[in-house]
């Protein structure tokens, strides 16, 4: 586990994605190809990501990874209300979707609803008792808001 933390620190120090900017790295085996969307999000092209994700939805593709990333992109674009809708939809498909739980929790933090953010953090703690990036990122967002 320490070697994994060392790698994560090295990536951050070398200019990689920071923990607060993680982009749903864990992919479901049955997920549609979201590589181009993730690249747009990493480049902070949230409008492009939203357009591509909406195009997939228009084609009838339904998947919690897609909804979680759409919520993330909408939230980062300032559309909290619609972001919440898509986080909820992702969690309806998969109540244990770690990315959606993290991102929804971060939205709760942004909205000042720390009780609900902590509820998501508790759910993540049960899903990954040994720790995971999603749990650590949400815990960090909660700590930053309460300090």
Image (cartoon, rainbow, N blue to C red):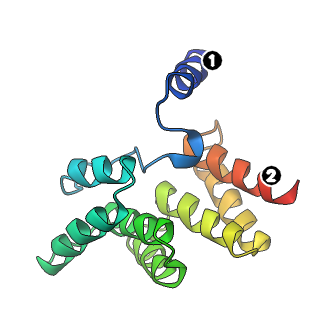
Where is residue 62? Give x, y as percent.
24, 72
State the SS at label 2.
Answer: helix
- The local crowd at label 2, few if under 14, some if 14 to 19, many if 20 or more residues have their Cα within 10 Å, is few
| Residue 5 to residue 120: above or below | above
Where is residue 133? Give x, y as percent.
56, 41
- The local crowd at label 1, few if under 14, some if 14 to 19, many if 20 or more residues have their Cα within 10 Å, is few
> Which quadrant would residue 32 be assigned to in this image?
bottom left
Q: Residue at 68% across / 58% down in the picture?
A: 121
Q: Residue at 60% across / 21% down in the picture?
A: 1
Camera-nearest residue between 139 and 17: 17
Residue 48 visible to the viewer: yes
Where is residue 58? Give x, y as percent.
15, 80
Q: Residue at 21% across / 66% down in the picture?
A: 52
In the image, 143: left or right of 101?
right
Considering only order in the chain, which callout, 2 or 1, is on the residue closer to the N terminus? 1
In the image, 106: left or right of 90?
right
Q: Which residue is mark 2?
A: 143
Q: Which residue is mark 1?
A: 2
Where is residue 87? Give x, y as percent.
47, 73
Mark 1 vs mark 2: in front: 2
């Amino acid at each position: 586990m320490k070697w994994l933390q060392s790698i994560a620190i090295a990536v951050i120090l070398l200019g990689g994605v920071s923990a607060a900017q993680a982009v749903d790295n864990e992919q479901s085996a049955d997920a549609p190809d979201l590589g181009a969307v993730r690249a747009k999000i990493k480049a902070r092209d949230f409008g492009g990501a939203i357009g591509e994700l909406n195009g997939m939805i228009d084609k009838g593709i339904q998947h919690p990874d897609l909804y979680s990333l759409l919520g993330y992109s909408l939230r980062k674009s300032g559309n909290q209300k619609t972001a919440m809708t898509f986080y909820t939809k992702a969690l309806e498909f998969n109540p244990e979707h770690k990315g959606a739980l993290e991102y929804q929790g971060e939205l709760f933090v942004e909205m000042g609803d720390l009780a609900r953010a902590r509820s998501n953090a508790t759910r993540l703690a049960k899903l990954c008792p040994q720790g995971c990036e999603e749990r650590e990122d949400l815990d960090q967002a909660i700590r930053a808001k309460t300090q």
